[in-house]
């Protein structure tokens, strides 16, 4: 009887620490790759899902504030969405065989009631993770992560010359925030913003080893320039193969989101080229 109780207790312990897994059939070139819907922020959620599929992606990361659909342009998509709106989005995802995996960048409040709205939304969609920069809410975030078994990645924007108090660009700072917290709390590694900050992405990934929850993978036309813009993978200054190899070596199993912030209304071919790069490189490596 003692062995049975112990076995049950162990099982419960393991289950509470087993974060949501992305289905294996969503992998392309060894990675779960798709789009951050912000890539298509000139369009609606429904159109972003369709365009992600057209580009060859398998997963999508939503952001708060996008309009729902051409038929309902006055409905806003975020964690305050009604159950009916969520079901409409789920139907569109099913239609195009796209799996929702992440949501952000979104503010998470310190108060549990406000934070719970974000996590209930993520739960309703079956998301693996939420992306934020709400460091001040870390205690509440950790409580929600443990309760909902949903991961949280802290995102980095570029360093701000006019705001030295902004520290998220620094992977050492992000590590200091997350290192003593639940293992399901880590970094949403925005590769492009590290490049804009004059940092080498592989060095940053190594600093955050074991704490990479997700990534916004970008190749840029210039290094260390805040105004640098996205280009198709393999045509800019970012060593995308080295980034992919480092993620692979770290056994990274989160989502890679293409957040393409250039040629806003005509970026689809370039987004598809990025996905094709990962597919081809991964297949060449037999990943």
Image (cartoon, rainbow, N blue to C red):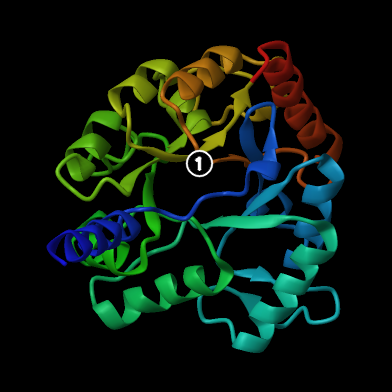
- In this view, 223 is above or below 208: above
List x then y, in percent, for residue 41: 70, 57
Does residue 161 appear left or right of residue 59 in this picture?
A: left
Q: Position of residue 113 (x, y in %)?
A: 30, 83
Mark 1 closeness class: few <14, some 14–19, many ≥20 residues within 10 Å: many
- Residue 257, given in percent of the width and then of the height, sits at 60, 41
In front here: 18 or 240?
18
Please name the residue that numbered disc 1 is placed on.
254
- x and y, in percent, of residue 17 in the image: 31, 54
Q: Nearer the viewer, residue 45 or 116?
A: 116
Q: Residue shown at 74%/79% (left/top)?
A: 88
Quadrant in which the C terminus appears: top right
Quarter where residue 232 is shown: top right
For the residue pair 6 and 286, the one nearer the viewer reads as 6
Residue at 66 percent across and 30 percent down: it is 230
Left or right of 253? Residue 174 is left
Please give the name of the residue rendered at 36% of the width and 16% of the height, measured from the top-left corner.
203
**Can residue 132 be seen in this snapshot?**
no
Element type where label 1 sits in the image? loop
The image quadrant of residue 157 is: top left
Residue 48 vs 179, above or below: the answer is: below
């Amino acid at each position: 009887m003692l062995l049975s109780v112990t076995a049950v207790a162990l099982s419960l312990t393991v289950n509470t620490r087993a974060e949501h897994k992305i289905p294996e059939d969503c992998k392309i070139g060894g990675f779960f790759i798709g789009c951050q819907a912000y890539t298509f922020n000139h369009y609606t959620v429904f159109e972003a899902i369709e365009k992600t599929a057209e580009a060859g992606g398998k997963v999508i990361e939503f952001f708060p504030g996008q309009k729902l659909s051409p038929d309902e342009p006055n409905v806003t998509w975020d964690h305050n969405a009604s159950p009916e709106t969520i079901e409409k989005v789920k139907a569109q995802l099913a239609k195009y065989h796209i799996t929702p995996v992440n949501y952000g960048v979104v503010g998470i409040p310190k108060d549990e009631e406000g934070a719970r709205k974000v996590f209930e939304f993520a739960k309703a969609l079956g998301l693996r993770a939420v992306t934020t920069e709400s460091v001040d809410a870390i205690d509440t975030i950790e409580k929600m992560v443990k309760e909902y078994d949903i991961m949280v990645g802290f995102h980095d924007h570029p360093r701000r010359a006019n705001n030295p108090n902004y520290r998220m660009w620094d992977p050492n700072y992000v590590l200091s925030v997350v290192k003593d917290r639940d293992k399901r709390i880590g970094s949403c590694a925005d590769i492009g913003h590290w490049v804009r900050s004059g940092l080498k992405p592989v060095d940053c990934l190594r600093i955050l080893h074991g704490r990479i929850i997700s990534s916004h993978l970008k190749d840029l036309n210039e290094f260390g320039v805040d105004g640098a813009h996205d280009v198709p993978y393999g045509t800019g200054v970012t060593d995308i193969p080295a980034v992919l190899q480092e993620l692979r070596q770290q056994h990274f199993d989160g989502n890679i989101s293409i957040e393409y912030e250039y040629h806003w209304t005509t970026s689809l071919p370039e987004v598809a080229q990025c996905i094709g790069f990962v597919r081809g490189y991964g297949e060449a490596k037999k990943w």
